[in-house]
Image (cartoon, grey):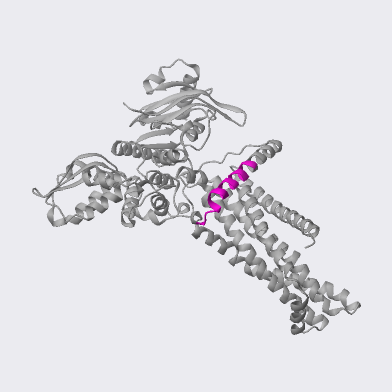
Amino acid sequence: MKLLVKVKDLVTILGGRIIHDGLSFSVNEGEIFGILGGSGSGKSTVLRAMTLLGKFQKGNIEILGYDLGHITDEVSNMLRLKWGVLFQSGALFTSLTVAENIEVILKEHTNLSPALINDIIRLKIRMVGLPDYTANLYPRELSGGMKKRASLARALAMDPKILFLDEPTSGLDPIGARAFDELIVNLRNMLGLTVIMITHDPDSIQTVLDRMVIIGDGKSLIEGNLEQVKISTNPLVTKFFTKLDYNNKT
Amino acid sequence: MQKVNTVDTNTLSQKMVYLERETKTLFLSGEWQITNANVLQTQLQNLNAQSIKKVDASKIEYIDTIGMLVIREFLQKIKIDKPDIESIIFKKLREFVAIFDTPVIPESTPIEKKPESPFRSLIDGFVLFVGFFGEITLNIFKEFLNPLLWRAKEVGKQVEQTGAKAVGIVGLSAFLVGLVIAYQVGVQIEKIGANIFIVDMISISSMRELVPLITAIIVAGRSGSSYTAQIGVMKITEELDAMRVLGFEPFRFIVLPRIIGLIFAMPLLVFFADMIAMVGGAFVANLQLGISYHAFAQRLYEAFALKHFYIGMVKAPFFALIIATIGCYRGFQVTGDSQSIGIFTTRSVVDSIFAVIFCDAIFSIILTRMDI
């Protein structure tokens, strides 16, 4: 299996606080990879570092064969088009409709004909399970779940190789959350995407993730599939799972 | 940013779309993706539909959804009933459209708030300010000097927003400025019987100092505050981050058009306000001191040195730069909650008015020392 993302000995310091202290993990092509950990463990920070939004002090992040610490502006611009990011709040451009949110990317970064762009927009909106009429709605007119789907459609606009998701099911009800999980698995199977997601959702962890890393104390406590992770004797890992199970029951 | 598919893939794609004339079979191969979709689309469009009987896509190594759309559109056009391609790729495409159709019910999420010490934010603010100015300077060298890179449409929109739409309020204020000066000066000047000098007083004081200053204050309150609020909200909703990951540098798309737009709009507003202030002055001079409009204009023509007008106009773009820079900078400082929008919008207006007055004072000192 091909390694797509490799994070090695990452050190991040934010505002004098050490967030990561030698964090390492790697993601294979085509898998759905989870980044887990308690609040403030630096999950979002590593996601921001991987998407070139945040800086890191030491270590390497290698994505698609490029070392993010040593790349030119041209390469970083090229890389940005090879991944899609779904932000926790959706982060759709509020002054544009759903269709325009997708259109603006294709218009700026490609020379495709307007007719083809329209087809792409319709396909992407259908792919994420939104009804066609949502294309002409503004983000404020969408429900929370629809917003997530619309921003997923935008993240998929350029047919990315890697999809980054920041708590995709947060703010959704259980039914909507399961539907979204199913959508992500289906999209992965069809498009051959590699998905890297931050999640707290016990159901997502059990049903969606192929492999995962649990972050604690700024390091990766354990990395592997659910069975491998669950038998870990690391007290922080067991604590994490007891908490999850507890939350799940209540 | 470079458009991804400006690469010349002509030679490559000629092999990717190959028509075998004897068997009337169209062979498709290679990687069909967003980066070469437009080239391939043109290739397919140039083919003669009648000369194709069969399509063989078994040699396609990689295809993304955009590649699929291009092929589907082509198949619809040539109306081939059962192309070989159907089973390989369009099974996938049909799946995309059909499978997902589950409605989602939303739920609201609570907003977290964290306290912050004022000292900390002061240091952060300073660091951000230095970084912001560094970025502005860099971008100005890179793009401001090359008008081809300006987002002309966006700049135009900003000129309309900050210039054209402010004409009413700026005009009214300028009229009142002229009127107030004329009244106040008129009372004093009447006592010594130097009535006609009211023209000199009004024209010099308003065109050189008061009108640019009042206009700047109105623009700071009107446009500076809106810059801060707009950018602040975009930051809260992660729109700015979204722009960055999508390859839209916020400086180029948000900050520069606002700065350039206001630099254009401000001198126009000041010029307009200058004229209106004269009208206000002439109106009162006529009413209170009995100076006819004709005599007012005559005196203005004889006594008013144009340099005062130019000085007022020269100040305008500097004031614009100050207001737009502070407005945008304060917008980027907004953090997390909606309260901070209010705080930074207030700061933006107060700071830019102060900075404008400060800048005006520096102008006065320099110009006086230079005997202008």
Between A74 and A92, which is closer to the camera in this rendering? A74
x, y (%) of residue B333? 62, 44
Marker count (numbered): 0
Q: Residue furthest right?
A: B192
Between B18 and B232, which is closer to the camera in this rendering? B18
Residue B114: tell me if it is visible.
yes
Where is residue A193, by image quadrant?
Answer: top left
Residue B333: tell me if it is visible.
no
* Secondary structure that dominates the magenta span: helix
Q: Residue furthest front?
A: B370
Q: Residue at x 51, y 55 (%)?
A: B150
x, y (%) of residue B40? 26, 49
B280 relative to B131, above or below: below
x, y (%) of residue A129? 34, 46
Between A227 and B120, which is closer to the camera in this rendering? B120
Left or right relative to A1: residue B284: right
x, y (%) of residue B285? 79, 79
Where is residue B337, by image quadrant?
Answer: top right
Q: Which residue lies furthest to the top in this view?
A: A233
For the C terminus of chain B, give its image quadrant: bottom right
Between B197 and A57, which is closer to the camera in this rendering? B197
Q: Residue at x 78, y 78 (%)?
A: B284
Residue B137 is a magenta residue: yes
Q: Residue at x 34, y 57 (%)?
A: A114
B213 relative to A159, above or below: below
Residue A139 is a magenta residue: no
Left or right relative to B313: residue A114: left
Which residue range is magenta in the image?
Answer: B130-147
